[in-house]
Amino acid sequence: MTPRILAVMAMLVLSGGAGAADAVAASPPAPSARAPITVKWLTRQATPGRLELTARVMFNAPFGERVSVSVSVPPGVQLLKGPASFLATAPPGLGAVDTDYGFGIPAGSVGDLVVTVDLQGPGFGVHAKDVHTVGRPSLGARKAVQVDVSAPPVNVNRIDLGPPTPLGR
């Protein structure tokens, strides 16, 4: 057992259970596992009709092979700057590989700009994806749900919860 577990067990025995939660809460958080490769869109500039993003591929582990990076655009959106697909190599000492993109976004365009990273090797594979949403319409005013008040109220343990709400509305 680790010294931390032994210390928590000793505190449980000595305190009769009190303070164990405080001992665990005061301990430093465990390190989290990092994905070997991540990808993220970074917004550089957004103006009406034009969007400039950077695709950041972050290498968190050494890879001897190049990874495939591809970008897909929704209908109507134009890729004005940057490659639709390319091969990226991990920089010396790991880190990020940035690629700049420019998109023409006509008024009323709706959809997702997707950047994907893939690597297939013997017995393993790596896949990462990020999405930048373009032009989702607002939901606007939604119709309020009408409850059928003619149904008898719901009572649970002698507590009146009011009329039931029908499913599907």
Image (cartoon, grey):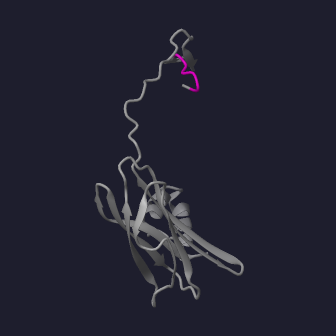
Q: Residue furthest top?
A: 150
In this orientation, does residue 76 appear? yes
- Residue 15 position, x and y percent, is 50, 59
Instruction: Say which quarter of the image contains residue 6.
Output: bottom right
Total numbered labels: 0
**Magenta stretch, main secondary structure class:** loop
Left or right of 106? Residue 14 is right
- Residue 145 position, x and y percent, is 47, 23
Q: Residue furthest bottom?
A: 92
In the image, residue 55 above or below residue 12: below
Q: Nearer the viewer, residue 122 or 12?
A: 122
Instruction: Say which quarter of the image contains residue 55.
Output: bottom left
Q: Nearer the viewer, residue 17 or 56?
A: 56
Residue found 72% across the figure and 78% down from its top: 123
Q: Which residues are magenta?
A: 163-168
Residue found 56% across the figure and 11% down from its top: 151
Instruction: Say which quarter of the image contains residue 153.
Output: top right
In the image, residue 12 above or below residue 164: below
- Residue 38 position, x and y percent, is 49, 71
Residue found 54% across the figure and 8% down from its top: 150
Q: Nearer the viewer, residue 3 or 58?
A: 58
Q: Nearer the viewer, residue 91 or 82?
A: 82
- Residue 32 position, x and y percent, is 51, 70
The quarter of the image holding the C terminus is top right
In this orientation, does residue 31 appear? no
Residue found 32% across the figure and 60% down from its top: 50
Magenta-drawn stretch contains 6:
no
